[in-house]
Image: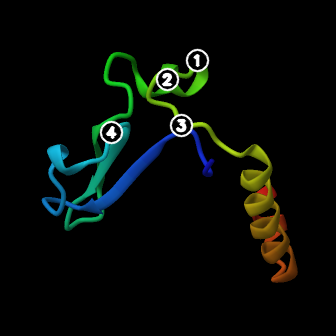
Amino acid sequence: MGKGRYRIYCAPKGLLKLEELPEKWGLLEVDDRMRAKLLWRPDPKYPLEYTMIHGSYHAFESDRRAEMSVMYSALRRLNEKGLLSEIIK
């Protein structure tokens, strides 16, 4: 089990080809101007928002406890640096 229900590569434009992606993976390309474009989403039959809410064949089994642990660790570090209040605003 991994973290996150969906897996999406983020790569510079032209680095990866869709046919090179593992099954169930998506691709987010970033151009020279740092603009991102989702070229392929994990479930092409439905909008990404629907897929994330309702799930699909393309969703991976995820470990919610591990995901929360990463989030809590990041929030703790932000708090230690005095930055948490800036995010909460």
**Cα distance, mark 3 to mark 2?**
12 Å
**Cα distance, mark 4 to mark 1?**
20 Å
The label number, if any, that marks residue 23 in the structure image: 4
Colour mapping: rainbow
Task: Give SS at disc 2.
Answer: helix
Counting from the top left corner in percent of width and height, residue 67 is at: 72, 52
With respect to residue 50, does 37 lie above or below? Answer: below
Q: In what quadrant of the picture does the C terminus appear?
A: bottom right
> Closer to the camera, 84 or 63?
63
Task: Give SS at disc 1.
Answer: helix
Q: Which residue is mark 3?
A: 60
State yes or no: discs 2 and 1 in contact (Cβ < 8 Å). yes
Q: Please rate how many residues cluster around mark 1, counting C-alpha atoms within 10 Å: few if below 14, some from 14 to 19, many from 20.
A: few
**Cα distance, mark 2 to mark 1?**
5 Å
**Cα distance, mark 3 to mark 1?**
13 Å
Counting from the top left corner in percent of width and height, residue 11 is at: 28, 62
The quadrant holding residue 35 is bottom left
Disc 3 residue type? Phe
Disc 4 residue type? Glu
The quadrant holding residue 44 is top left
> Closer to the camera, 56 or 39?
56
Q: Which residue is mark 1?
A: 54
Of the residues under marks 3 and 4, which one precedes in the sequence?
Answer: 4
**Cα distance, mark 3 to mark 4?**
11 Å
Task: Give SS at disc 3.
Answer: loop
The label number, if any, that marks residue 51 in the structure image: 2
Instruction: Tell me the mark number nearer the camera, choosing from 4 and 1.
Output: 4
Counting from the top left corner in percent of width and height, residue 66 is at: 75, 55
Which residue is at a point 44% across and 29% down the rendered structure image? Answer: 58
The quadrant holding residue 18 is top left
Task: Give SS at disc 4.
Answer: loop
Disc 1 residue type? His
